Amino acid sequence: MLRTFYRLLLGGETFHLQTSVTKELKKLCIRHSKRRISPLKFFLDCLLRSKMEGEVGKLLSSEFKSILTPEVNTLFSAFIDHGYEVRIVGGAVRDLLKGIKPKDMDFSTNATPDEMIHVFKDKKIRYIETGLQHGTLTAHINKQDFEVTTLRIDVETDGRHAKVKYTNDWKLDAERRDLTINAMSLAFDGTLYDYFNGKQDLEHNQVRFVGDPRQRIMEDYLRILRYFRFYGRIATSPNQHDKETLDIIKDTAKGLKMIAVERIWVELAKILVGNHAPSLLKLMYDLDVPSYIGLPGYSEENMNEFCRAWNESKMHALQPVTLLCCLVNTEYEAEVLARDLKLSNAERNLGKFITEHRDPKQHEDPLKPYLDMLVCSPSAQSKETLRGHLKELLHYQGRHDLANKISTWPIPLFPLRGDHLKKLGMKPGPELGKALSQLKEIWRDSYYVATEQDLMDKIHSLLNK
């Protein structure tokens, strides 16, 4: 009889977890024996109610089936065998609905952290207490890591962080998320749960906050930037914003001042390289958002430069810091911006380099000045770092053919050393260094084809000057 119920509940599919359900029924027999409630009826009522709440259909796409690896199935089975529910949540669900195989997946469960630990120990699954205070553990299965978080509700927020308590209500957990398209969850059998019409918003390319936008933003002001980031990912038109939402963003933007700049840059970097970036950045300036996240004041000239560079990035992707530095005019301003946003040393150095060499160098051979820079770099490591900067610079300038050439250009070695001049009687010192510099200039002017003998023939004329 039970198997018949399982098949009916799951749309005719074979359900292979009779053992765990039987265990659950036994628990219910004990738990409800004094209440004269049929444990089977109670269990099925709960299961049906859970199935109907927020359920909008099933996802059985090839992308979904491809993520059901043995490791993922092991994770699902571990929880279900112990009577707990576990679902895929967040961005992975959104990607799957867009026909994209997600790069990684997050999971939520109605098991508490202590119950998760019991599950993992019982199933001999290694785990790491990565965020136990937030209800998150990481399961390690066959060299793959899976983050699993207990369902939560916010009990206190300050615009940056939230104090949470655990719940077993999937809708309440979804309610605390930022956007409807990020609030969906997916069960192991492909059942999609959507409590706030995220699937419909995704189909219509709309970005909406869950519930009251003001409340969601005030829980974590970083959600302002997340709104713009996901607009760039989801929307097909640059100007399909809800006016009320924009008014609320303008009214609450000052709250971004309390957000750590490292978190600001993570979101801003994705906005800069995303779709509709020029219109989104202009809109952010109109809403006074940049004033609170460390960006320079608005400049029409700089905005035009950003638009130009962003359009070039369609031909070849540019790094976020390259686009960011369109908003400054000098190397010093790039240094200040990097410091204010706490960029990495690599990002800071690239930003300063792009800003310093922004304008194309004038030469009859447009690539020659950049080859000279590469040849003059002092070490092999610095040469390769510089090569990367030069490639980025040339792509930024829109000279993609030159960038491709310099990426594979074999860097020649200067054929002379100080020993060659010492053999001619020159003593170590400033004069020898000056002569070597002059010979290097002759070699560069020859487009690096002058041989050792060619240069040796020039030495006497240099010495006689």
Image (cartoon, rainbow, N blue to C red):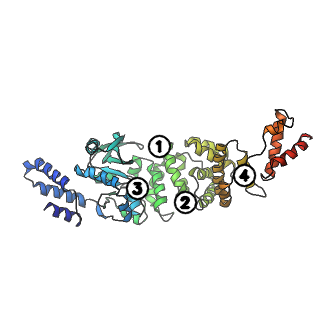
Please state which of the two labelled residues, at mark 2 or mark 3, is closer to the viewer: 3
Q: Which residue is mark 2?
A: 279
Q: Residue 372, how many percent across, how many down?
A: 74, 49
Numbered badge on residue 91: 3
Work out whether 255 lies above or below 401.
above
Tell me the distance, in whole angstroms, between the alpha carbons under discs 4 and 1. Answer: 43 Å
Give residue 441's position: percent from left, percent from top: 81, 47
Residue at image position (50%, 46%) is 264
Q: Say what amino acid the circle numbered 1 marks.
A: Ile
Q: Earlier in the sequence, mark 1 or mark 2?
A: 1
In front: label 4 or label 2: 4
Ranked by sequence position, the earlier of labels 1 and 3 is 3
> Residue 130 in the image: x percent, y percent?
37, 41
Camera-nearest label, 4 or 1: 4
Cα separation, mark 4 vs mark 2, equals 36 Å
Q: Are marks 1 and 2 in contact (CB under 8 Å)?
A: no
Counting residues from the start of the chain, the first of labels 4 and 2 encountered is: 2
Q: Residue furthest right?
A: 464
Q: Position of residue 247 (x, y in %)?
A: 46, 55
Tell which tag, 1 or 3, sits nearer the viewer: 3
Amino acid at the residue labelled 3: Gly
Residue at the image point whose x is 40% and y is 66% from the top: 203
Instruction: State which quadrant residue 165 falls in.
Output: top left
Q: Are marks 2 and 3 in contact (CB under 8 Å)?
A: no
- Nearer to the camera, 276 or 214: 276
Q: Is residue 232 above or below residue 372?
A: below
Secondary structure at badge 1 equals loop
**Mark nearer the viewer, 4 or 3:** 4
Q: Quadrant of residue 128?
A: top left
- Amino acid at circle 4: Leu
Disc 4/disc 3 C-alpha distance (Å): 44 Å
* Residue that badge 4 annotates: 371
